[in-house]
Amino acid sequence: MNFKEAYALVKDIQSTTNRTDCEAVFYLAREIPSGGVIIETGTGDGRTTAVIALATMNRDIRIITIDDYSESKRYGKKRGEWSINCAKKSLNRLGLSNIDFVSGMTSDYLKKYDGKVDMIYLDDCHLYSVVKEEIILSQSLVDNGIIAGHDYNNWYSEGIAVSKAVDELFDKSKVKITNTVWSTLYCKEDK
């Protein structure tokens, strides 16, 4: 499946992730070898999750998606339940079943995760301290893999916080920016 076909399937899933950003994520996920593991944070209604799953279809890749649907400040109880159900419904409609949903805080999950991760895509909380902590935790799980995320920009406060954390923790010459998606091939030796 190419990106144009994948986007036609996901474009109606509610999201702040636009077409250009979806395309960047699609091609990052395509880099992951069969048998790999991808962790995505900030499931929301599932558009980015679907893009990742479509990019890796038929390749025996485990996808874990994390969101804190119980957080009343963010969703409210009914909105949280509705959102996770929308995400699951959208993914089931597309026949995408290789996805593990985790409800909770990303940092808590990453601290407990025991195993290698080939790609982590960060797009949940955009507070500077949270983004920085999640990147540091990602660096402990990824070796010779991709660490990436959404909302790298300098035109609104959340993006500025993301940009600041990324710029502090990575060599700028090794970070690729596509619209508002940032990514780097991370090797522990390079740290």
Image (tube, rainbow, N blue to C red):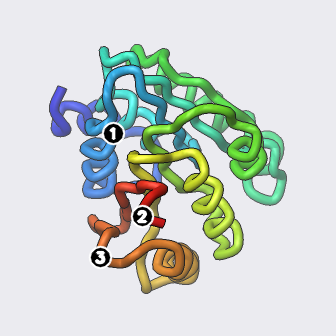
Residue located at (68% from left, 64% from top): 133
Q: Secondary structure at mark 2?
A: helix
Residue located at (62% from left, 66% from top): 131
Q: Nearer the viewer, residue 164 or 104?
A: 164
Instruction: State which tag comes first along the sequence, 2 or 3.
Output: 3
Q: Which mark is residue 130?
A: none
Of labels 2 and 3, the one closer to you? 2
The amino acid beneath tag 1 is Ala
**Which residue does the numbered mark 3 point to in the structure image?**
173
Instruction: State which tag comes first along the sequence, 3 or 1.
Output: 1
Disc 3 to disc 1, how far (Cα)? 21 Å
Q: Nearer the viewer, residue 151 or 147?
A: 147
Residue located at (83% from left, 52% from top): 72
Disc 1 to disc 2, how far (Cα)? 22 Å
| Relative side of 156 to 75, left or right | left
Crowd around label 1: few <14 · some 14–19 · many ≥20 (10 Å): many
The amino acid beneath tag 3 is Ser
| Relative side of 181 to 168, left or right | left
Q: Nearer the viewer, residue 187 or 73?
A: 187
In the rendered image, the vertical position of residue 137 relative to residue 47, given as above or below: below
Crowd around label 2: few <14 · some 14–19 · many ≥20 (10 Å): few
Q: Position of residue 178 (x, y in %)?
A: 27, 65
Q: Which mark is residue 29?
A: 1
Q: Secondary structure at mark 1?
A: helix
Label pair 2/3, CB-CB below 8 angstroms: no
Q: Nearer the viewer, residue 107 or 95?
A: 107
**Which residue does the numbered mark 2 point to in the structure image?**
190
Of labels 3 and 1, the one closer to you? 3
Q: Position of residue 132 (x, y in %)?
A: 63, 69
